[in-house]
Amino acid sequence: MVEQIESLVRTIVEPLIDHPEEFKIEVHDSEEFMEYHLILHPDDIGRIIGKKGRVIRAIRTIVYSVRMRDQKRSRIVIADDLDQEDESTVE
């Protein structure tokens, strides 16, 4: 099931982004959900979120609605790389 959801997410996301070579999906198993963390090039994050979050909301609706009996629901998370520091401020 995980591979099928991952394939579905790839099929939806890859045509929307400019840097598909940097697109990765990490799967995390939480108590309630199978979480699919999308790792994207910074320029592609806005394209996946869309105006007022419409694109990511549509993707989440599709993925969240896919559920097999006795399986956890799926969740999409856009992973941000906020750990980068601006080195230009260091003297």
Image: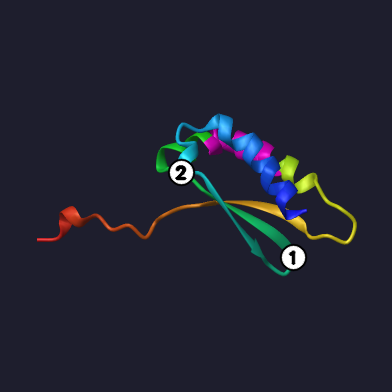
Instruction: Please name the amino acid that badge 1 sits on.
Output: Glu
Circle 1 sits in a helix, a strand or a loop, which is it?
Answer: loop
Do the residues under discs 1 and 2 have CB atoms within 8 angstroms? Answer: no
Q: Nearer the viewer, residue 50 or 42?
A: 42
Q: Nearer the viewer, residue 90 or 5?
A: 5
Q: Residue at x 68, y 67 (%)?
A: 30
The answer to whether residue 89 is left or right of residue 73 is: left
From what the image shows, is residue 23 above or below residue 83?
Answer: above
The answer to whether residue 15 is left or right of residue 41 is: right
Where is residue 9 drawn, in percent x and y? Answer: 66, 42
* Residue carrying label 1: 32
Q: Looking at the image, which residue sits at the far left?
A: 91
User: In the rendered structure, which disc, 1 or 2, sits on the residue that comes first in sequence?
Assistant: 2
Q: Nearer the viewer, residue 79 or 11?
A: 11
Tell me the quarter of the image containing the C terminus.
bottom left
Asked if the stretch drawn in magenta spans residue 54, the answer is yes
* Residue carrying label 2: 22
Asked if the stretch drawn in magenta spans residue 64, the answer is no
Q: Looking at the image, which residue sits at the far bottom?
A: 31
The answer to whether residue 70 is left or right of residue 79 is: right
Front label number (1 vs 2): 2
Q: CA distance from mark 1 to mark 2?
A: 28 Å
Q: Residues within 10 Å of mark 1 (few under 14, many from 20)?
A: few
Quarter of the image where one finds residue 43: top left
Q: Residue at x 67, y 39 (%)?
A: 59
Circle 2 sits in a helix, a strand or a loop, which is it?
Answer: helix
Magenta part of the chain: 48-60
Q: Residue at x 61, y 40 (%)?
A: 56
